Each structure stands twice: as C-alpha cells, then as structure tokens.
Amino acid sequence: MTVTTLFPALCYVLSWWIGAVYSVPFEVEQKHLPHQDPLPSLLWHQPRVTRQDDRLCDAGSRQWTGFVPVNRNREMFFWYFESRNNPQTAPLLIWVNGGPGGSSLLGAFYELGPCKINEAGNSTTRNAFSGTNFANVLFIDQPIGVGFSYTNDSNLWAHDLNEAENDFDKFLDIFLDDVFPELSNRSIHFAGESFGGQYVPTYVSRMRRRLDSIILVNALVSFPKVVLGLYEHFCMPTSVQGVELSVSRRGFNDTECAEMAAGYPTCDHFSRLCDMAYDGKTCEAAYGACKPVEDVVMNKVTPGGLNPYDDRVDCIEPPLCGRLGMEEITKYLNQAHVQKQIGVENQIDFKTVNMDLNEQWSKASELFVPTSREVAAILDKKHTRVLVINGNNDIIVNTEGIKRIFDDLLWEGQAQYRVSPWISLYFQEPLGNHIHVGMSKTSGNLSIVTVDEAGHIVPHDQPEAVMLVVKNWAMHGSVWPQEHRSPFETAVI
C-alpha cells in the first residue's frame, strides 16, 4: 500500500507522511589504500577515493570524496571531512539523511557540514557552526539508489531495510578497515535524521562493530505515536480555572480539536497492538486506524496554510511547503565540473530525493513497524548511548510524539528515565547573555533534547545550539558539562 496521506512526499520522511563548465583544470590526489587487490578481474572491489581541494567547499580542513563498492555494479558514495581541530584524535560523526531516498548531501550542505550552498546554487560559503569544528564527519549517500550512490538499474537498488543494512555494514567495514583505517579506533557516533529513525536503530542493532553512540534527529521511530502527539501539539488547553495560559493552538479551533480527540482512543489502542505484535500488517493497520486524527491536520496543509515541517511559517506550496535546501543543492551538484571533481565517472542527473525509490519502499507494510525494540536493544545489549534531538516546531515528527515514544520504551532504565527531571538548557553568547535552547532529560545512557524555535531540520534552524549539544555529547559524554548544571534544574551547554 502506498502511503499518500499527511506529510506528503518527503525528502526527510517517508512519502506521505508515512550550468557553466568550470574552466580551470584540476588535479586530484588518489588516496593510497593499504589493501588494494592488483588482479584486474577484481577491480570492482577497489574503492575510488579523491582528495578534494577547497574549490567546491572551503571546509577549513582536508576532505575526500569516494565510491565504495559493496558488490559488483553497486557503489556507495561518501564525502568525508576531517575536523578543523585535532583531526588525529577527534571523534568520527557519521551522518545519514532520511526519506527513504534522501541524499545525505542535504545534511552536508544545508545542515551541519562545513559549507553552505548559496540560493543561486553556484557557490559555497563556510559554515561557522559545522560538526567539523570538533569531529571528523562522514556523509554517506545510502541506501544504494540514492544521491550519487546511484545506478540506472533499479533492480540493483536496495529494496528494503534488510538489504540496506547489509550494504551499509559492508561499506563501513571497507571504509574503516581499508580506506581510513586510522579512524577505526576512534569514538564513533552515528546520526540519522527523520527516516534515519528507521535506518540507524536497524543498522546498529545488527552491526558487529560497537559504536559509542547513536544520535536521532527529528527521527521517525513510530508512526502511530507521532500521530498521537498531534493532539497535544495543537490542542493544549489555553486556560486553567479561568487563568489564560501562554499556549498557541496554531489556528486549531475547538471543533477540530474535538474531532482529533474522537479518533484518539482508537489510534492509541492500535498503537499498543502494533507495539506488541511488531509486524508489518498489524502496524500498517495501526497507521490506518490513526488516519482520522492525522486527516484533521492534513486538511490544513494548503498554500498559505499549515507547514508540516515548521509550524512557525505558512506553507508556500504542498507537499514540501517551502525551501528545504533541495533546489540549490540539486543545481550545484548537477554542474559538470562539480561531478567531475568529486569523481563521478559518467555524469548523472543528481536528485536530492529519489522519489522512485521512496515510492518503492513505501509499498512495504514492514516499513510501518517501529524501531523501538531496536533502540532498547542498543541501550541494553550493546550498552551504547542514545541521544535524541527534536525541534519543538516540527509537526511530522513532533516533540510530543517523541516524548511518548521514549516514555513507553521498554528498556532496563525505563522506570528511572520516567521520573528523571527535565532540565532547562541555555547557551552563553560571546557577550555573556544566556539564550534558552530548550529542555533536556537524561537517565543512564539515554538523553533527550528538545529545541525551541526549530522545525523538522533542527541543525539548520538552530545550528549553534545543535553543534554545542552534539559536541558535548561526543567529546564529554553528556549533553552539558556536569559542572554547568545549577541546583535550579537548569544547565548551560
């Protein structure tokens, strides 16, 4: 069944909801690989890695692009940037975007990479709040069929999470063992955005290699629970015992909230059935049972109406409703000189989102199964830390739904997590002012951070805050330095 409901065709979440030629010649440095096989019959095994200069992206550090074969005629593309500071000891941050079908170069050039592409799509500028300020950062186009990991033969695309996981595991082994073996013993953190809430927990729960943490950014872990979060997001009471509260319903009236409330018990019931059964048919049925709640919101996603990616701004034109960085990235990466320099052998029509793959994946009922058990296994069996970051103005993966997901998560630390307090987070400006970031909750290896004034693409909307949170997490093991927490349940990141 193809999902064609709220939250239409996505670059970051499942489709639903669910040039001028560069005139200056360039030279590239081919990275020496320690385990290259000299036999011509095995040449498809060879990664193709190209050292980049600063013409495409003045990153402030060394950078490489490359193609890693996971089997014959199937390659996975990466863009790897060393840290601007102490790259020899810096942690490794791996980033994937969602979709399914979204290129991770969206993250590289619109979110936390070292460069941003201008609106004209013809040049880049340095990003002051890049993850490369503190980490070596690896952006991977995956699964096969996405971005520059493209093949015209759709039979060679990864067709589901199982195939995608196998490919990713092969890629990571080759990248860390053969291409950049100096990174294999670093602290490794794997971040995924939106549909990355399916990718990252699935991959890591099955992975032989132990990572230091996973980072879930506005991550889709459970379809029904993010639908259940819609009521709380839009329909909180505006007064208590006659006292007006500073709550905005964002244009939802009592009738619409009552309509959502009427569908809530059925949605909640089927959500619980999905959690227990944990199979595609039951969970697809749960999503269908939740559709009346979702439809109340969907009906307001119109030109000039509700923007499902950011409730602070109006929708320009559904389904994407506004600029999400795709136009300029697509234009920039389709320039002939750009593709030649990064190592593309035969120029392709680069797409930030492969909607054919998206549609193909969305027909599988297994895609409705949550990844909550995988997250619990990562916490309990792999003893791997989990950081969740969510923008409070996102609708499709709303903070209220995220809170429900992790309150309900069945893991060894559940009881302690539920009673742990929420802490107000601030960061200090150069002039000394404290700026409120949002709220955070930590118990054991699980931390949640909710970010104010941020929609679905939180690293773009609040780049400095997100950079500080992830830096503390990767380098110091917590969202904030412990000495910065006050007795009044606040902390400075």
Image: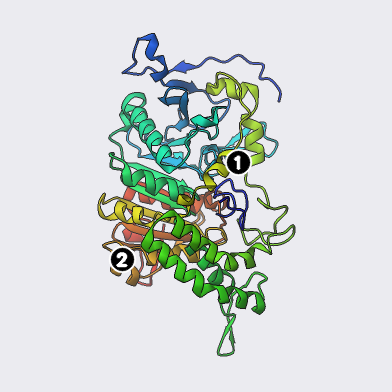
Q: Residue 355 carries which label?
A: 1
Residue at the image point whose x is 63% and y is 65% from the top: 295
Q: What residue type is labelled 2?
A: Gln
Is 482 rendered above or below residue 191? below
- The image shows residue 446 at horizontal and vertical percentages of 34, 58
**Which mark is in front, 2 or 1?**
1
Label 2's element? helix
Drawn side of residue 172 relative to residue 460, left or right: left
* Screen quadrant of the C terminus: bottom left
- Real-space Cα distance between discs 2 and 1? 38 Å
Q: In which quarter of the image is residue 17?
A: bottom right
Does residue 32 appear to the left or right of 220 in the view shown? left
Above or below for 98 versus 445: above
Closest to the observer: 232 or 88? 232
Say which residue appears at 67% left-offset and 33% top-offset.
331
320 horizontally vs 229: left or right: right
Relative image position of residue 42 (x, y in whole percent):
37, 14
